[in-house]
Image (tube, rainbow, N blue to C red):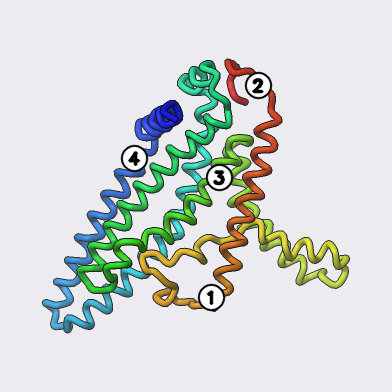
Amino acid sequence: MDSFFSLVRIFFSLMIRSKAVWVICAVVIAMILLNFYFQSQMNEWLEGGMTYDMATRRASNSLSSMAAQVRSYSILLVIIVSALIAPASRKNGTTQFVLSMQVTRLKLSIAQYAALTVFITAAVMITHLGFSIVGLYIGSMGLFEVLIGWISLLVPLLIVAAISFSLSTAFSSIVVYITLFGIPSLLLPLLDTFMQWKGKWIPVPVARLFDNFGFLFPDPKFLMFWPHLSPGHMVVDPPFPIYMWSILNLVFAAAFWIFISYYFFANYNIGSRQPLK
């Protein structure tokens, strides 16, 4: 167990020394600017004659809009960062040294993902802290939202990170981006357009396959209530059972991609001292 935590510390320090440190700095600076922005806006509105209730309501709407953008861009950022760790480590001298110490590749990958989890958790907590200060200041967030509202942002991001990272252990970063970006944004809309155009000429089994293909690429933003505890503050508030099916869809889709990745990862035969392909 001590050796595993040592591996996690090693790979986390490697992340911090590389591009990851700039991401954390950007998040911290963004949260500081966010607080200054909302405080200055509130003072400007109040000095302009706007009532306190109207100013707080306007600030709350702006905060919700900004949170929606954070949810979208955080998924993009997590996929990109997660897909860069494993391919870069294949040429890293530290990784080769760890493999030479008879550490299995599976344990190595789990330690890398654990380090990635620590990094994502730190970024989410910093982001949530910045939003919590503003939310408490304008009255749009309560105490429970401040304490546990970050969970609905962190958990989906960790699942997305697991998918992206597991794919990157067996494939290149380009393949990961094509799978997680290209297929959902390009191929699925083309399939939908083709089904509407020539749907009646397509055999029923093939049509059903096309219809269900999109379930392999669920949208985690649908499950992100952050910075609130429920979807009541969001524009769309679908029934609760839809969320349950969405959670199951995300979990099973993640299990599918992780299984595929592990199959290719486990069947690639390398020696402990050879560079990872």
Which callout, 4 or 3, points to the residue nearer the camera? 3
Q: Which mark is residue 240?
A: 1
Q: What element does badge 1 sit on?
A: helix
Between 213 and 182, the one nearer to me in the picture: 213
Between discs 3 and 1, the one toward the N terminus: 3
Between 25 and 232, the one nearer to me in the picture: 232
Q: Position of residue 5 (x, y in %)?
A: 41, 31
Number of numbered discs on residues:
4
Which callout, 4 or 1, points to the residue nearer the camera? 1
Q: Is residue 200 left or right of residue 173?
A: right
User: For mark 4, what is the residue?
Assistant: 22
- Is residue 219 placed above or below 254 in the rendered structure? below
Which callout, 2 or 3, points to the residue nearer the camera? 2
Q: What element does badge 4 sit on?
A: helix
Between discs 2 and 4, the one toward the N terminus: 4
- The Cα–Cα distance between marks 4 and 3, rounded to whole angstroms, is 20 Å
- Is residue 119 placed above or below 246 in the rendered structure? above
Q: Is residue 84 left or right of residue 196?
A: left
Tell me which residue sits at (39%, 34%) in the image. Answer: 12
Q: Position of residue 185 (x, y in %)?
A: 61, 58
- The Cα–Cα distance between marks 2 and 3, rounded to whole angstroms, is 22 Å
The 10 Å Cα crowd at callout 3, few under 14, some 14 to 19, many 20 or more, is many
User: For mark 3, what is the residue?
Assistant: 164
Tell me which residue sits at (35%, 48%) in the image. Answer: 123
The 10 Å Cα crowd at callout 1, few under 14, some 14 to 19, many 20 or more, is few
Q: What element does badge 3 sit on?
A: helix
Q: Is residue 194 left or right of residue 26?
A: right
- The Cα–Cα distance between marks 2 and 1, rounded to whole angstroms, is 47 Å
Tell me which residue sits at (43%, 74%) in the image. Answer: 234
Between 78 and 230, the one nearer to me in the picture: 230
Q: Position of residue 173 (x, y in %)?
A: 57, 38
User: For mark 2, what is the residue?
Assistant: 270
